[in-house]
C-alpha cells in the first residue's frame, strides 16, 4: 500500500477545516434541487381562490354554494390543482378541465356511498352543484388522484367537453359514486387508465371504455352492471379487480372484442356473473362465486352465460353459495350456460361450483373442455 506523505495529509486536514468549499457547493446543489422539485410538486391549492365564507361552506355538513369559480380561476394559474381535504365537500358544475389538467386530493374512499352523507368527512370529496349538470367536462390528457366524487343518477362521471371520444384519462385512488355511469359515458367513448379506485353505488359502474387498462380496483354494489362493454368497447385489459354484488351482471359484454379479464374475483351478481353475447374475450385466473343470487331463470343462474361469440377460459375456479349471512338463494344452477352457436375453449378449470350441473349446452355450440373438473 502506498504511504501518503505526512505533510500532504496535514495540508488536506487544514484545507478541509480552513476552506470548507465542498460543503458549501454541496449545500448549494441541495438548495437548487429543492427549488427544482418542491414538496408540492408544483401544485397550487384551490383554497386561496375560495372566498373565506365559501371555504367555511366546504367544511360544513351540508355545503350549499357553487365553488366552481374557484377551480376555474385556479386553472387559469396552473394545470396542477390541489384540493385539500374538507369536512364537507366541494360543489362544482360544468367545470371544463383543459388538456393536461391534474387534480389531486386526499380521500378515504367508502366501500359504498348510498347517500351524499357517506362522503362527508372523507377528505377531498366533490359533488355536483346542479343535479342536471356534470361535475367536470373532460378534455384529453386529464388526471385525477385522491378524489371522492359523488354524482346523481342522471349524469355520468366522465363527460366529454367536445362531445367526442376522450383519450388518455388517468384515474388513481379515486371513488365514483351515485352516477348513471361511474367511469364512462353513454354519449361517448373513453380511453382511460384506472388504478386503485372504488366504483360503487352507480347505475352502471364502468361502460364504453376502449383501449383502456383497469387494475387494482373494486367495482361493487352498482344497480345494474359492474362493467358493461358493448358495440365497439374493444381492446381493454382488466386485472386484479374485485367485481361483486352488482344487481344484474358483474361483467356484461355484447358486440365487443379483444377484451381480457384476469387475476380477479367476481362475486354474488344478481344474474349471470359474466354475460357474453356475440363477443370475443379471454378469461384467465378468475374466481367466480355465488352468481345469480336473485334470479330463478336457469340461464341467469349461472357463472358464465354465452350466446354466440368466442371465449377462451383458463384457470378459473367456480363456487356456489348464499349471502354472507348464510341466507338467500343457493346459487348458481350452472357454471356454464351456452347457446346460439357459442365457441368455448375451457382448460385447467374447476367448474363444480354449481347446484345443478356444470355445463348446460344447447345444440350447435363448439365447446372444448380440457383438464377441468365438472
Image (tube, rainbow, N blue to C red):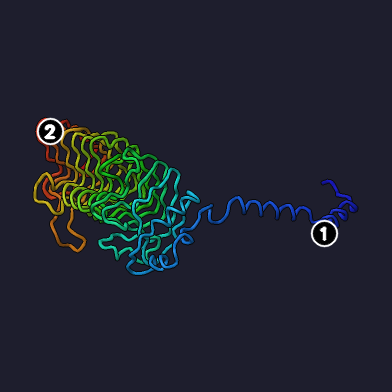
Query: Is residue 265 something that shows in the picture?
Result: no
The local secondary structure at tag 1 comes to helix
Give the position of the C terminus as an image quadrant. top left
Q: Is residue 367 left or right of residue 265?
A: left
Residue visible at 34% across and 54% down? 93
Residue 29: where, in percent of width, then height?
68, 51
Q: Is residue 242 left or right of residue 53?
A: left
Residue 173: where, in percent of width, then height?
39, 54
The residue sitting at the right extreme is 7
Residue 186: where, in percent of width, then height?
25, 43
Would you place residue 366 above or below residue 122 in this image? above
Query: Is residue 60 something that shows in the picture?
Result: yes
On the image, numbered disc 1 is attached to which residue?
17
Q: Is residue 17 left or right of residue 239?
A: right
Q: Is residue 24 left or right of residue 251?
A: right
Residue visible at 35% across and 63% down? 65
Residue visible at 25% across and 61% down? 114
The local secondary structure at tag 2 comes to loop
Would you place residue 157 above or below residue 88 in this image? above
On the image, numbered disc 2 is attached to which residue?
340
Q: Earlier in the sequence, mark 2 or mark 1?
A: 1
Q: Nearer the viewer, residue 165 or 48?
A: 48
Q: Nearer the viewer, residue 216 or 303?
A: 216
Amino acid at each position: 500500500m502506498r504511504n501518503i506523505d505526512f505533510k500532504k495529509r496535514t495540508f488536506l486536514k487544514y484545507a478541509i477545516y480552513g476552506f470548507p468549499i465542498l460543503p458549501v457547493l454541496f449545500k448549494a446543489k441541495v438548495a437548487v434541487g429543492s427549488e427544482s422539485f418542491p414538496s408540492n410538486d408544483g401544485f397550487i391549492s384551490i383554497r386561496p381562490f375560495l372566498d373565506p365564507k365559501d371555504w367555511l361552506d366546504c367544511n360544513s355538513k351540508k355545503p350549499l354554494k357553487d365553488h366552481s369559480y374557484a377551480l376555474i380561476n385556479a386553472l387559469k394559474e396552473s394545470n396542477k390543482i390541489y384540493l385539500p381535504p374538507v369536512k364537507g365537500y366541494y360543489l362544482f358544475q360544468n367545470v371544463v378541465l383543459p388538456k393536461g389538467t391534474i387534480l389531486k386530493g386526499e380521500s378515504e374512499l367508502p366501500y359504498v356511498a348510498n347517500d351524499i352523507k357517506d362522503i362527508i368527512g372523507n377528505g377531498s370529496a366533490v359533488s355536483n352543484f346542479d343535479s342536471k349538470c356534470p361535475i367536470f367536462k373532460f378534455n384529453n390528457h386529464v388526471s385525477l388522484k385522491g378524489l371522492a366524487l359523488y354524482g346523481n343518477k342522471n349524469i355520468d362521471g366522465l363527460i366529454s367537453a367536445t362531445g367526442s371520444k376522450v383519450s388518455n384519462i388517468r384515474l388513481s385512488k379515486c371513488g365514483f359514486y351515485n352516477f348513471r355511469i361511474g367511469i364512462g359515458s353513454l354519449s361517448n367513448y373513453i380511453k382511460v387508465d384506472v388504478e386503485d379506485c372504488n366504483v360503487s353505488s352507480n347505475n352502471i359502474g364502468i361502460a364504453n371504455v376502449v383501449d383502456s387498462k383497469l387494475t387494482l380496483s373494486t367495482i361493487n354494489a352498482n344497480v345494474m352492471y359492474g362493467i358493461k362493454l358493448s358495440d365497439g368497447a374493444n381492446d381493454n385489459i382488466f386485472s386484479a379487480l374485485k367485481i361483486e354484488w352488482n344487481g344484474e351482471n358483474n361483467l356484461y359484454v355484447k358486440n365487443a372484442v379483444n377484451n381480457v379479464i384476469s387475476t380477479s374475483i367476481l362475486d354474488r351478481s344478481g344474474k349471470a356473473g359474466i354475460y357474453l353475447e356475440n363477443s370475443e374475450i379471454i378469461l384467465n385466473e378468475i374466481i367466480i362465486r355465488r352468481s345469480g343470487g336473485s334470479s330463478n331463470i336457469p340461464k341467469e343462474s349461472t357463472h358464465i352465460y354465452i350466446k354466440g361469440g368466442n371465449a377462451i377460459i383458463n384457470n378459473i375456479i367456480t363456487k356456489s353459495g348464499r349471502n354472507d349471512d348464510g341466507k338467500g338463494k343457493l346459487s348458481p344452477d350452472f357454471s356454464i350456460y351456452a347457446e346460439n352457436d357459442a365457441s368455448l375453449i375451457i382448460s385447467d378449470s374447476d367448474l363444480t361450483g354449481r347446484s345443478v350441473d356444470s355445463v348446460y349446452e344447447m345444440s350447435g355450440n363448439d365447446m372444448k373442455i380440457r383438464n377441468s373438473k365438472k
